[in-house]
Image (cartoon, grey):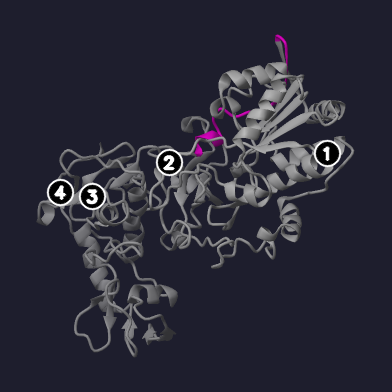
Amino acid sequence: MPKLTIDGKEIEVAPGTRIIEAAKKNGSDVPYYCYHPGLSVAGNCRMCLVEVEKMPKLQISCHMTCQDGMVVKTNTEKILKTRQHILEFLLVNHPLDCPVCDQAGECWLQDYYMKHGLYDSRVNEDKLKKKKAYSIGPTVMLDQDRCILCSRCVRFADEISKTHELGIINRGDHSQIEVFPGMELNNPYSGNVVDICPVGALTDKDFRFKKRVWYLRSTDSICSGCSRGCNIQIQYSTERPHHANGERVIRLKPRYNELVNQWWMCDEGRYSYKFHDHNRIEAILRREPHKVTELDWETAISEIAGKIQSAAGKIGVLVSPQLSNEDLWVIRRVFQENLKVKNLLLVSPNAEGFQDDFLIRSDKNPNSKGAEQLGFTYDATALQSLLENCRQGKLEGLIVFGQDLFSVLEANLVEKALKALRWSVMISSNHNLLSESATYVLPAATYAEEEGTFTNFEGRVQKFERALYPLGASLPEWKILVNLSKALGQPVHYEEAGEIFKEMAGKVKAFEGFDFDAVSTGGSDVRTFAAPTIPELEKYDNIL
């Protein structure tokens, strides 16, 4: 294990550690643009230069590995002066359009210039003009004027997505990022080039001019787009501004987790946030022939409890692998243990889709593994049989959590089953065909509006935090069930998700030994939640 001294502090690091990482670990701030821990080393921005004792020239710390006995300095007068010259060089042709740049507030060029710049510019405004704001693919805009040629996006397309759409053309001050002829930046991970662009050269079409980043807040969460469970940040507005189409959730960003998604996320997950604010069920509804009535929770719960009791066990319950472990556990407690419901089945709300050998999984549900560990399995034959029993009048009522049966089963069979039932209950966050047919429609919170856990396909339990208050009358599914259990005279007592998790951990082997409050602290066990903040975004934590 090499031992070296950085800015007067001795540090021991693993063999092969680069000086820039050792300096970060040591608390020394070494600026950089082209370096990214998930990409190959380019060493072309020169911002990370440091002094190494016995070496006559400054060295780029992103390339040089630590050696035993090294003495490194990161903030000498020579280094600081060199950083000023590098920044001056980078700004020779850079447009001064910070007020209208979508990267403002999270731009490394702004940050480093405020810390290391000359301030009194020696640059004339006769700058070389390049192409501004033009589309290079379905999700990304390129502004060549702002590019500092760090080459991060090129290396990402070559090494991570391996789709090779981008390159640097021409030479000298005419060098520029460009898409290869006949191609466009159109791969399942294209949005990541915006995340790693340190300036405003690459911007996200979906996010452009929606919201200034200093008006956003950020909460750690888990992507629900597939069974990978990529670690993300939900970035949101505390209001529902008209200029953002009434959206509270403004964008999703990947969050570093070495064991799950590293620094990346797919575009499908990135742009899946719309359902948090659009097409939401906000009120409790009772549907009668030619009439829809809005109810309060007390009335709706009382009526549904009465129907369940009068059905004398002749009901079916369909649950979704989109639900959290906590929701599934309370469903099990209420319907399986207390009410002894035999027709308790898992329905997948999404057909299996595209999968690759990187992040994307074919199972488009975040908690299929958790459902399995809690005793819920998908059985197509049993599901068909349940619907047939509904059609034949053998069941009186059906309670459906989340999924639109019309989208995953034969529509004609579903329609006949619903018509034959005396009543049905749909508990969901968003309107769909089933919510337009159910007798009772109860609004449920989305994962951004509650806390809980998902278990990814590897068996890794991952915690998501509440970012927003539930919209309208929405409640987490488990809270709806707690109220329903009280009305049924067989109450289950939970005040928060942590209590449910604690009970699960004491009774289900897959969760044994876990503590809800500690599960987000990280770890290497395949069941634990390991989710530190992206190292590169740490400096923006106070802003976002």
**Residue 164, numbered label:** 3
Q: Nearer the viewer, mark 3 or mark 4?
A: 3
What residue is disc 1 on? 339
Amino acid type assigned to the residue bearing label 4 in the image:
Lys
**Residue 268, numbered label:** 2
Q: Quadrant of the N terminus?
A: bottom left
Q: Nearer the viewer, mark 2 or mark 1?
A: 1
The Cα–Cα distance between marks 2 and 3, rounded to whole angstroms, is 20 Å
Looking at marks 1 and 3 on the same chain, the residue that comes earlier in the sequence is marked by 3
The verdict on residue 455 being magenta is no
Q: Do the numbered discs 1 and 3 sit on residues whose CB atoms are within 8 Å?
A: no
What residue is disc 4 on? 127
Give the residue displayed 41% in from the left and 53% down from the top.
264
Q: Do the numbered discs 2 and 3 sit on residues whose CB atoms are within 8 Å?
A: no
Residue 275, position as x, y percentages in the image: 53, 34
Residues drawn in magenta: 273-290
Amino acid type assigned to the residue bearing label 1 in the image:
Leu
Neighbor class of circle 3 (other Cα within 10 Å; few <14, some 14-19, many 20+) is many
